Image: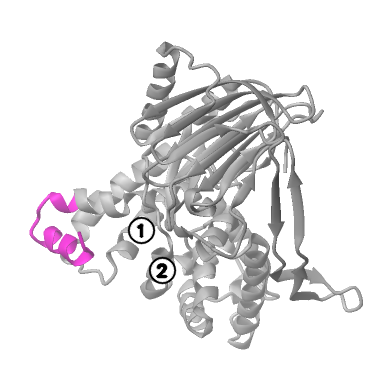
Amino acid sequence: MKREVISEALNNISEEYRAEALEMHSLEVVSGPGNMKKKIVTIILAAAITAALGATAYAALNGMTARDGEPGETLIKVEPSHVCEDVYWTDEDTGEEVVGSFVEEEQTLYYDHITKVFTFDAMDSCNEIEFCASYLPEGYNVLCGGVGQWIPVTQGVTDSNERWYNIDIYYAPQFGADGSLFCMDDFTSEETIEDGDFIIYKLYGTHYNSDIPAYYYLMYNTVEGYLIMIDSNESMQICEDIAAGLEIRTTGGVIHYNPNVSHDIYFGSGLG
Amino acid sequence: MDDSRIVDLFFERSEQAIKELSAKYGKLAQVVCANILKNESDAEECVNDSLLNTWNAIPPAKPVSLCAFFVDIARKKALDRYRYNSAERRNSNYEVALDELEGSLKGEGTPSEECEAQALTEAIDRFLGKLKKQDRIMFVSRYYLSDPIPVIARNTGLKESVVSVRLHRTREKLRTYLRKEDLI
């Protein structure tokens, strides 16, 4: 069948079905392309003229609290047993695709070198978001995401795997009142900037148990309850340039607090 | 503002109708156009043209779904622009989606034996009516709106691999259905 015929036929499918599919799209823009870019650029300019705050032992900010880890602070995280559903695999005997589920056993994880802990004002739910990067540094292989793609996570790495960057999203309801976003990397300095709804948190240091540089750029929206984390092992400038080019919008999904999962989330070294 | 009020504004010939339509569905139309064109500024032009076309179409038209009506105009604008821009380029989301469907609907007959587009539309509509709602939404999202798989996965809450497999099965079902109907 000619593609022209298929194309013409698709043009005229029932309005009812088109409306049904369109209804699924929720494209409310949290921060329009112009607004967001302007806002972040403003923030960066503000940062340039603001004296560096130096190492801050404790910073209580609107909706988000940051503190340094205590010497020897250890966190024991229990990942409860859970069922992984809708798992697809190919049956070796029949060659057919099979869908099923399996049980992931309970795991206990030990983190014994905690250096930075972020906690959040409890939120029961918040809008899910995605971002679109208009700038990503050149010379990297993009493992997921890419310039111009709306996506919730992006990773890039160089051929030699010596340099990388990541963009991730976290949500306040993931942490609840009892959980935290924590790290084991070693930091030598940090900056905090508050601007409107956003808190920008910059961390400079080295990755856990290594001398690989670590740069983290955290943008927390205190109203919407989402946090975008950009990290690079090359420079803070890369993180800032990526941030300046981000557009953000809601997906229509909602992130809810789940009492049955761990509320402590580790962030740190490398790609994962 | 709800859709019926916006349609009323069109009937009242109030230019506020354009502003409200643009604010409510402009971004959505932009995404659909960009799926086809892979060019934001071209997509934006199509959306702007579509606002004017909608202004000219309503009245007399009184759409049941203002969203579907407006997005359809924008999509057709984007297709026209796409054909104008490059007949040779085969890398937009629209082309990729069409490639998938063309591969599944490859018939054995000669082009002269192929069905007319209208008959195919009617058959696809009947076929869509038999699908589960989620499969139907995924099909229309992919092959009408040219949504990339990750977008459909996110909107439906399913994994990308699950979406791919289900779309593949839906295409296979469509092929079987069209064969039964003697359309391919």
- In percent of width and height, residue A203 lies at 58, 25
Check residue A18 in the rendering and tell me which mark sits there, or answer none: 2
Looking at the image, which residue is at 55% across and 20% down?
Answer: A55
Callout 2: few (<14), some (14-19), or many (20+) C-alpha neighbours within 10 Å? many
Q: Picture quarter containing residue B2?
A: bottom left
The three-letter code of the residue at mark 1 reads Val
Q: Which quadrant does the N terminus of chain B fall into?
A: bottom left
Residue A186 is left or right of residue B46, and the answer is right
**Residue A251 seen in this snapshot:** yes
Check residue B71 in the rendering and tell me which mark sits there, or answer none: 1
Q: Picture quarter containing residue A233?
A: top right
- In percent of width and height, residue B81 lies at 43, 46
- In percent of width and height, residue B125 lies at 46, 79
Residue B23 is left or right of residue A92, and the answer is left
Query: Please, is residue B19 above or below residue B172 in the view?
Result: above
Looking at the image, which residue is at 64% across and 33% down?
Answer: A70
Looking at the image, which residue is at 37% across and 40% down?
Answer: A31
Q: Which residues are magenta?
A: B1-18
* Chain containing the residue with disc 2: A
Colouring convention used in this rendered image of the protein: one colour
Q: Does the magenta-highlighted stretch encompass residue B156?
A: no
* C-beta proximity under 8 Å, tags 1 and 2: yes
Q: Nearer the viewer, residue A189 or B56?
A: A189
Q: Picture quarter containing residue B183?
A: bottom right
Main SS class of the magenta portion in the image: helix
Q: Nearer the viewer, residue A112 or A232?
A: A112
For marks 1 and 2, give the CA distance.
9 Å
Looking at the image, which residue is at 9% across and 55% down?
Answer: B13
Residue B30 is left or right of residue A107, and the answer is left
In the displayed orientation, state which residue is furthest to the left: B12
Residue B51 is left or right of residue A220, and the answer is left
